[in-house]
Image (spheres, helix red, strand yellow):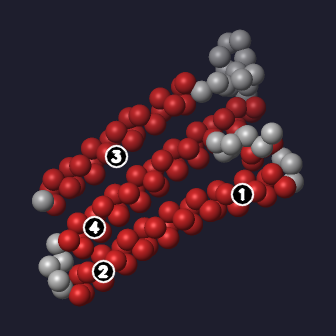
Amino acid sequence: MYKRLLFVAGYVLFLFLLLSPLQAHAQNWGGCVDANGVASLNCLPVVFSNIVRAALMFVGVIAVFLIIWAGIKFIRSGGDPKEAQSARSMITYAIIGLILVLSSFAIIYFIAYLIHTNCFTQLFFISSK
């Protein structure tokens, strides 16, 4: 059972690493690349945006994996209160971690929106205009 779950986790991680760069190639680079295909410093917001998107996807995959793992652990506890409490705390910590990561991005976006800076708002999915 554990070997199969480890195999599935490795497969999901492999797919994440394989499919993440494809979004970066499909993105509109705008005017930051010159005629020779050389990137300039104007490409930094695009690069940071790709990094943030990949980090959010990775954190989401890890949180879902931990919640599923804790659910399996809870089911397999067999009525043992210590194991059930361990599984509940694992679910709680996974959800709290996901909320903290998402709220930190929301706070940064909100501050950037308040001070009207485009550098930070270009890092996120939603346009501030």
Q: Amino acid at mark 3?
A: Leu
- Label 4 crowding class (10 Å Cα cut-off): few <14, some 14-19, many 20+? some
Disc on the earlier residue, 3 or 1: 3
- Label 3 crowding class (10 Å Cα cut-off): few <14, some 14-19, many 20+? some
**Mark 3 to mark 4: distance in Å?**
20 Å
- Label 1 crowding class (10 Å Cα cut-off): few <14, some 14-19, many 20+? some
The quadrant of the rendering that contains the N terminus is bottom left
The image shows residue 62 at horizontal and vertical percentages of: 40, 56
Q: Of tags 3 and 2, which is closer to the observer?
A: 2
Q: Are marks 3 and 2 in contact (CB under 8 Å)?
A: no
Q: Is residue 64 left or right of residue 5?
A: right
Q: Are marks 2 and 4 in contact (CB under 8 Å)?
A: no
**Mark 2 to mark 4: distance in Å?**
11 Å
Q: Are marks 3 and 1 in contact (CB under 8 Å)?
A: no
Q: Amino acid at mark 2?
A: Ser
Residue on which the image places disc 2: 86
User: What residue is shown at x 45% (from left), y 50% (from top)?
Assistant: 58
The image shows residue 83 at horizontal and vertical percentages of: 23, 81
Residue on which the image places disc 4: 71
Residue on which the image places disc 3: 13
**Mark 3 to mark 1: distance in Å?**
28 Å
Disc on the earlier residue, 2 or 4: 4
The answer to which image quadrant residue 107 occupies is: bottom right
Disc on the earlier residue, 1 or 4: 4
User: What residue is shown at x 40% (from left), y 52% (from top)?
Assistant: 61
Residue on which the image places disc 1: 108
The image shows residue 104 at horizontal and vertical percentages of: 64, 62
Disc sitting over residue 64 in the figure: none
Q: Are marks 2 and 1 in contact (CB under 8 Å)?
A: no
